[in-house]
Amino acid sequence: MSVSIVVALPKIEDAKKIRTILVRHGFTVTAVCSSGSHALASISELGYGILICGYHLSDMYYYNLKEDLPAGFEMILLASARVVSEAPVSVLTVQMPMKSSDLLNTVNMVDGQLERRIRKDKKKPKLRTWKEQNYISNAKMMLMQRNRLSEEEAYRYIQKCSMDSGTNMVETAQMLLMLFYDEL
């Protein structure tokens, strides 16, 4: 699995040459452009990826572009030795004129970091909405009042019923609340 790459350079011909190098080595290049606004528009449709860009595009500098990058994107700046020496540490750089091996090694490294981040993000539990949390809280309160359980015992009861029935905790809490209100 390779993350998406957007190439944004002032000269579209240069951007296409870099795309050719990357595609030849198995990377997915989703967009090639010469302006920062076009790059941002392409990036907005993607979740994670790499932006390879030059120092100055037709409508903005790389640092303006960096400010607008979404959290799932990393930037690789292609620039002269002077610009590379002045670039912030948060921006990975490849010095121009470049060797294709330098670019490929940098892209490989960033690709690996992003893939690890994607896997890590997928493992995080999904946060419940206020409404979902409210169902669970109401079911806990009902069990605490009705069955004289502590808050922890009520939570564990909902959790166990959820696991036994193969439903998520919100659905289990809703079922418990419906059963309680049907008895009234």
Image (cartoon, rainbow, N blue to C red):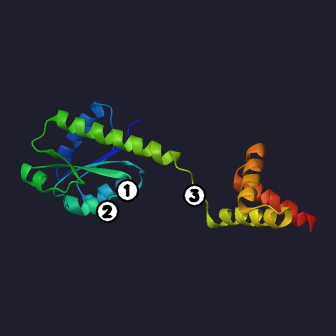
Q: Are marks 2 and 3 in contact (CB under 8 Å)?
A: no
Asked whether, in this view, residue 30 is left or right of residue 144, the answer is left
The quarter of the displayed image where residue 143 is located: bottom right
Q: Residues within 10 Å of mark 1 (few under 14, many from 20)?
A: few
Query: Residue 165, percent across and down?
Result: 78, 45
**Residue 25, which numbered label?**
none
Q: Which image quadrant: the N terminus? A: top left
Residue 155: quarter of image: bottom right
Q: Amino acid at mark 2?
A: Asp
Q: Depth check: give the residue in front, 88 or 140.
A: 140
Looking at the rendered structure, the secondary structure element under dot 2 is helix
Residue drawn at (56%, 51%) of the image: 125
Q: CA distance from mark 1 to mark 3?
A: 18 Å
Residue type of the residue flagged with mark 3:
Leu
Residue behind mark 1: 71
Residue most toward the top?
25
Tag 1: residue type? Ala
Q: Residue at x 79, y 64 (%)?
A: 144
Q: Choose between 11 and 169: the one closer to the eye.
A: 169
Give the residue displayed 70% in from the left and 50% down from the top. 168
Work out which quarter of the rendered image holds the C terminus and state it: bottom right
Observer-nearest of 33 and 60: 60
Residue furthest to the left: 82
Residue 127, disc: 3
Q: Position of residue 111 (x, y in %)?
A: 33, 40
Of the residues under marks 1 and 3, which one precedes in the sequence?
1
Numbered disc in front, either 1 or 2: 1
What is the CA distance from the residue labelled 1 to the residue labelled 2? Answer: 9 Å
In the rendered image, which residue does mark 2 sit on? 68
